[in-house]
Image (cartoon, rainbow, N blue to C red):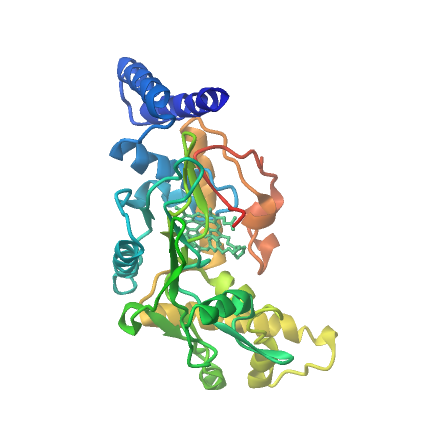
Amino acid sequence: SINHERLLTEAARFIRDCYRELGLPQEQQEERIREIEEEIRRSGTYAHTRAELVHGAKMAWRNSNRCIGRLLWETLEVFDERETKTAEEAYDKLTRHIRHATNGGNIRSTITVFPPRKDGTDPLRIRNHQLIRYAGYREGESVIGDPASVGFTQTCERLGWRGEGTPFDVLPLVIEERGQEPKLFPLPEELIMEVQITHPDLPGMAGLGVRWYAVPIISDMRLEIGGIDYPTAPFNGWYMGTEIGARNLADTGRYDLLPSVARVMGLDTRSARSLWIDRALVELNVAVLHSYRQAGVTLVDHHTAARQFRAFEKKEQDAGRAVTGNWTWLIPPLSPAATHIFHRPYDNEVLKPNFFYQKD
Ligand code: HEM
Ligand SMILES: N/C(=N/c1cccc(CO[C@@H]2CCNC2)c1)c1cccs1
């Protein structure tokens, strides 16, 4: 069928790229493509070998145009959990992922790959945006916690979850088995490493009682390799400080902390010309970098991350691959023009394997 033809085309392109990069001989590549052709003819799909899955996941990271952290794409650790059947089994793999990735603060970039889509349906889905995230409770005009989580928090409450109502309640996992009701799995506290945000020179910062979690683990994107869709493949790296200090804690539509930081700094917030917003932003980001280092949790500042990305650009050039990127995402939200990224264009061609948003 036409779909089988399309799948074979995607598969053949992936096998050619993957086997060449792994230095495998031409005949082995051709024999593998014939094997896959046979499997698609017989069953309508095909299964990746362990080696194809591992390298395909690394290629997907390398092809993520919006990611500034791609220099380390080959260090990704891949857990092959494609045999997982139930939501309970998936929960166990997810707690193991969190423990392995956290590693006491010395964060390891990790991805866990669950079963692929089959006959157009997903055997398992994680409904969380990230495995670890804070709840958001709407109280009339205002929100307690993370406004970005208000919708998902309501979903969890409809499923029977009750949070403590603090601004930093860690949400439960919501795992859905094909065709069944989604199930709630609270995360044990001892599993979740967090960092208290303090400032080296502003004692008032600690008084804000602000914290953030150590490990960002994206759990709602689809991993596509050689025409096969993995709708559940949670992956983590470590944070770049600005994600926390210039967005999650600073956006007026998130924790909106800049007025509070300005107060702690004794700034005049009555006129924009005083640049109090900019001064508060810098000190909040100084606090984030200071706190994660003091807690021994891996974190990269946006200047170092930009330099590592520059090294990635060179490395790709040397490998004979044109670097692709999305400029609007690659520039950091704080001091963008102070990085080389701001001053050059990037080709936003979408290569595969890659990670994609999914409609639901
Ligand atoms: C190791 C440290 C890493 C750092 C510091 C890093 C940094 C970043 C940053 C700052 C963003 C933009 C996020 C935003 O603005 O909301 C991003 C996007 C992204 N990163 Fe990385 N990253 C790292 C590792 C990884 C890994 C291991 C993967 C996958 C295997 C990955 C895949 C992606 C993808 C797919 C996006 C785009 C997400 C979207 O479109 O919403 N990154 N990264
Ligand atoms: N540092 C990170 N940052 C992010 C990477 C991808 C996505 C996100 C969150 O994206 C949300 C959707 C658009 N902005 C917020 C954050 C990583 C998470 C997982 C691996 S590295």
Using the rendered image of the protein, determine whether residue 131 is visible from the camera's viewpoint. no
The reply, left or right, for residue 263 in relation to residue 121 is right
Q: Residue 188 placed where, x, y %?
A: 29, 71
Q: Closer to the camera, 224 or 192? A: 224
Q: Closer to the camera, 101 or 268? A: 101
Measuring 51% from the left and 69% from the top, which residue is drawn there? 154
Measuring 35% from the left and 27% from the top, which residue is drawn there? 18
**Quadrant of res 349:** top right
Q: Closer to the camera, 184 or 105? A: 184
Q: Where 30 falls versus 259 (above or below)?
A: above
Using the rendered image of the protein, determine whether residue 91 is visible from the camera's viewpoint. yes
Q: Residue 346 placed where, x, y %?
A: 58, 38
Q: Residue 166 placed where, x, y %?
A: 45, 81
Q: Where 114 falls versus 253 (above or below)?
A: above
Number of numbered discs visible in the structure rendering? 0
The reply, left or right, for residue 332 in relation to residue 84 is right
Measuring 70% from the left and 76% from the top, which residue is drawn there? 274
Q: Residue 317 placed where, x, y %?
A: 45, 31
The reply, left or right, for residue 256 in relation to residue 224 is right
Q: Where 287 falls versus 205 (above or below)?
A: above
